[in-house]
Amino acid sequence: MTEGQQGAERLIAGRYRLLRRLGAGGMGRVWLAYDQELECEVALKELTLPEGIPEQELSARVARARAEARHAARLRNHPHVATVHDVVEEHGLPWIVMGFLPGATDLKEVVREHGPLPPAETARIGLAVLDALMAGHRIGILHRDVKPANILLTRGSAQDPSCEEGARVLLADYGISLQPDSGEPRLTGTSGIVGTPGYLAPERARGAPPSPASDLFSLGATLYYAMEGNGPFDRPSDVSTLTALLFEEPTPPIQAGDLGPVLADLMVKDPAERIGADEAMHRLAGLTAAPQAASRTPEPAPRTAETMPLPERPPASQSPPGAPSDGEGPPVAAVPAQLRHPKRPKANSGRTLGFIAAVLLLIGGGIWAGVALLNGPDTANPQAGPVLPYGNEVGLPRELRPGDCVSAAWSTERFQSLPKLKIVDCKNYPDAQVLDVNATTSLADARTNGPGVCVGLLRDQVRKMTDVQSFALVPSGPGWDNGVRNTACLLFGKTVSLYGPVADYRKHGDQIFVENSSIGDCFNTRKLGENNYARLLVDCNQPHEEQVLGYVKAPQSMKFGSWDAMYDLCVKQYGSHKDPTRDLSGWVHEEETWNDGFRFVACMVTASKEGQKLPPGSALAAVE
């Protein structure tokens, strides 16, 4: 009887029945198992240790496995991170429960079997992985081992939706890979260096501590492999590979095209000179559709609703399953009194639209991508009035610029038509704000590639906020002829208005609401009256009272004012942070907005006593 057959007879933690071994790596074995409680297949990572290991080293390895499992679990709701569901114990050792990915293939194997990928496809994979890395970096989690074998490509499984992993590009192995280690050498020793030769940042090879910049170097080397079929520093041995990594420049890529400079900037040896994540995101987004734009020389005829039917709007994402609390004893609610917010008048519907076609792009995690609505040439008599840059349906008299805020009136369901837009004061509860514009080479390029470009440009801000989506507004035909050459990338509130400016258009001292807050925002509170407070945005490098950890969607059954239940949602999602100086709290909007469908709780790290403040620097980093 084989080891796999023997193991398959085991029941782990009284719940997970092992079916067969999927693979083995340096730190353990990965099993396919059946979850008898949820009745679905999962993957179990078994921590394996050499015989006779000293007790101190044993304790250190077990603690590290648990810590890395918790790190990955905090990112489990990200659409591009392989999911960790739980950590259970069997005979004193941790077993890590992960989502099973049937048919998943890692990037290394894809390139081995099918050859190098085109630059645009490589850039799309890079965007997804970078999105996952940035989500971790925002809460102090570093990956430390980005490489082709840790990027999984999968279509998901519709047969078992309760345990489905739906994202097509997933970053795996925050120390707990879902896949075998493929026999690659790993640098794991007493020095604490973790990584893979050829993909390790040079400063890490010299013993410097890991940083977000070191993850970006590894991403650049990984994308180089995807496009060239070999690593940028590949040599016959590990020693010669590390020597090249430290002292030589990457081998010039052959087929990188416009992606080459981005990879070169990601792989700069000095981390202080290396490109940052935001700039990398911006430049990769601009390359995802480049081949399509270049190949479309004739301008296509405008599509109509008859030739391009609109898909149904996806349902709102359900609140994710919570992580177990790390706190001791039952949590005590620490939710401040309800904050009263100004009420936003409901927008009036505009007139019925004439000629409309739409492209809906879906992205992972249940958040819609931007909608580019492709209107045909304006057939109105040009002598009847001024040429409107985005057509008569939109009605704007001038081209939108970054920072502009607009109100929107929809003649049909939101985002399934062109809205009637009006430029408004950003403090007057706008429906959307322009965060970027993208210069295009032709009207056909704007219509074809504008949606994808806006998704990439606004992706990071969408991930930092809740219940928002990007929207690409392309110029009309006459507008293009009249000098409009940019696609405007707007950020819309999906359910309600933004209640103020967003991103870098807010100023310290501004009153901020849940709708326009972002993960990482720091606040001080000001009492305006009985049970009436305002949250004012402040510099996180100064003492502050609160900081946003993230957002949780409340279930439909939860009633407004269920403070204990809201607090529990935050604890389940982010763990308990209660200590003598710090606590957890929940922040919600007024009941009218809650009933309108904005059912999101902002989870906050707060100073535990009135009058105290959190120290300068990131409270999120302090939690780690």
Image (tube, rainbow, N blue to C red):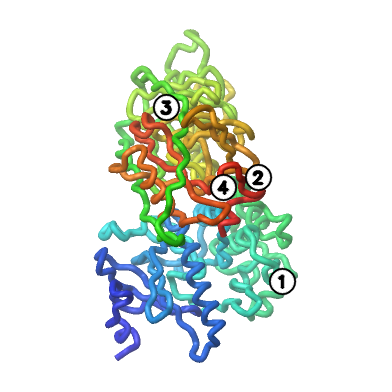
The quarter of the picture where the C terminus appears is bottom right
3 and 4 marks in contact (CB < 8 Å): no
Q: Tell me the element at label 2.
A: loop
Q: Amino acid at mark 2?
A: Pro
Q: Residue at label 1?
A: 206
Residue carrying label 4: 607
Q: CA distance from mark 1 to mark 3?
A: 56 Å
What is the quadrant of the N terminus in the image?
bottom left
Residue 168, quarter of the rendered image: bottom left
| N-term mark: 3 or 2 | 3
What residue type is disc 1 on? Arg
Question: Label 4 sits on what residue type?
Answer: Ala
Q: Is residue 265 above or below residue 611?
A: below
Residue at image position (26%, 63%) is 38
Looking at the image, tell me whether mark 1 or mark 4 is earlier in sequence order.
Answer: 1
Q: Residue at x 27, y 60 (%)?
A: 160
Q: Earlier in the sequence, mark 2 or mark 4?
A: 2
